[in-house]
Image (cartoon, helix red, strand yellow):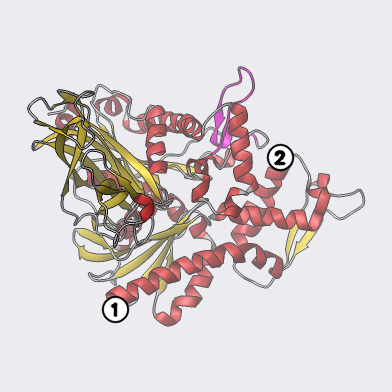
Amino acid sequence: MPISTFIEAYLGSLLIGIDFGTTYSGVAWAYSKQPEDINIITNWDSTEYASADKGKAPTRISYGKGYEQTTWGYGVGDDEAIEWFKLLLLEEADMDLKQRRSPQIIKARQMLQKAGKTPVQAIADYLRLLWKHAIINIERCFGEAAVEGLPIRVVCTVPAVWTTDAVRKMREAAKEAGITDYRLAGETTLDFVSEPEAAALATFDDLKSRPNFQEGDSFVVCDAGGGTVDLISYKVVETKPLKLVECVEGSGKLCGAVFLDQEFEALMKQVLGGAWDVPDAILKGFMNSQWENGVKRGFEGQDKNWKITLPHECVERGAPYHLDLNQGHVRQIFEEIISQIRVLVNEQIDAIEEKEGKAPKAVVLVGGFGSCRYLYNLLSSENKHRGIEVYQSPGTKPWTAICRGAVFKALTNSSLPGTMVQSRISRCNYGTRYVTDFDPLKHLECDKYLDKVSGRAKAGSQLSWYLKRGDNIDEAKPVRLPWHINVPIDQFCNHYPLSASIFTCNDREPPTRQTNTVRPGASIQSEKPMDISSLRPFKGTDGKHYKKINFAIEMTVIGAALEFALMYQEKRIGHSTFQAQVDL
């Protein structure tokens, strides 16, 4: 028995949830024997006194110059901050043209290159500082000896729209940050949960005490954050203890609040022309005071003018320092982004009605952008006639829902009582590539080749799918498919290092052959070369001698992860486990 399991059984463990966001990041924690008492990390090092006790810190980092110390969060000056680097974990192919050309994303990439950092390294550096701050504050509250003596279960949140490769990079960054470093109390476990599921766990914990919260009810959770907007829908199957199943496949898009900021900047450039060309520090100060904490938070769709105080650098001598924005200007800023969210919400509602035969009870708004009054008003008015309510919690609850929900996820991972999500739906296809006899009725001529071993026509680059998009991942039983490979004995006489690749595809209908939408997902290697000395050789049509190795690849669901194992003579000889791209 691992020492961490032994200690946890008697003393409990620390549960830590990390919400690494595009614009802000937060940490929450609890002691497993008092799971209802969830604490939010604050006490940030800050040059702004009013920011020290906020529920999150900005996702910003600066590497300084020369020997200057790396700064982060509220301690970074506006003119030196590297921001938006979370989105750089996505490949450009996973962004649309407008997002790829986003000035903020381009600038983030340029600043990282200037600093000599990859996105993974920058995220690791930020997480290292965030983790250190969190541990110091937990020790201050809980005691240094207690923290040192307890195992830690960490759950980090990721956008539901992220690819498997992006989640892999995030795990790499978390490990590089030292989150899973060895401790005397044993192994620190690191798991991931999608941001909307984390938000849902926190939200349903708040909702379950309501009198109208009943079995059979379904809810749409709209997690509107800085970079992404993710939607996930759940049906309540039990209330005590709370158990949920996912209703329909979730959805999401890069249409978060930072793209509103981009639209506001574009409007300022349009109105002010060359006068808008001001230093970054002045621009960010203006954006923070006049937009972030002004128009953006106050706009509800009301018919009024908004008075903007311009930086004096933008104003010619004798000209007014104020600019009036009317409702049309402001609505124009919001409209393109909000309309994308409305489409996502309506698609979820329609899918639930089609599957369940009735509309969801409510749409729950969470995330920083989920606090937007205009978004709440629009969704409420649009769905009132369908009998669907829209919930928007007060204060900082929507903002901290994700890191609080990550703690709930850590609780369920530790086999302690908590909200259980019993089934999730895959957002991706997972399979392997193979060769088979060529059939002109099934296969393309371009895949045809002559196999020198058998002398027959074969079709290469064919695909077999273990798990398909839309499948219920928790109900997926282990799937084992047999394969074989012919190896020349002049190269491998008695021992052979077997390997295989798992491929992923996001298409709703996965292809039967290799296309440009199919990507490598994981590689499986045998832990040591297989002993094939007992296999009988045979002569191929090319005159060479071969041995035929029969093996299998077995897929097993472990929580929200998929394990692919190589099986030879009924023994596991190698495996690879990775986070599935599901509504985790």
The residue that label 1 is drawn on is: 357
Q: Where is residue 155 in the image (x, y as percent from the top left)?
A: 33, 41
Report which residue position mark 2 lands on.
280
Residue at 33%, 76% (x, y): give it: 353
| Quadrant of the image occupied by residue 71 | top right
- Name the front one of labels 2 and 1: 1
Residue 118 part of the magenta segment: no
- Can see residue 511? yes
**Which secondary structure class fits the magenta region best?**
loop
Q: Identify the amino acid type marked 1.
A: Gly
Which quadrant: the N terminus? top left
The residue furthest bottom is 385
Find numbered disc 1 in the image and state the secondary structure of the residue it sits on: loop
User: Which segment is the magenta one?
Assistant: 55-77
* Residue 398 horizontal/vertical position (percent): 44, 55
Q: In the visual, does 150 lie left or right of 87?
A: left
Residue in the foreground of this view, choosing between 535 and 143: 535
Classify residue 142 as left or right of residue 121.
left
Q: Where is residue 188 in the image (x, y as percent from the top left)?
A: 28, 31
User: Does residue 306 appear to the left or right of 362 in the view shown?
Assistant: right
| Amino acid carrying mark 2 in the image | Asp
Characterize the local packing of mark 1: few (<14), some (14-19) or many (20 or more) Cα atoms within 10 angstroms.
few
| Quadrant in which residue 136 is drawn | top left
Label 1 near label 2: C-beta < 8 Å?
no
User: In this view of the protein, which residue sits in the foreground, 267 or 442?
Assistant: 442
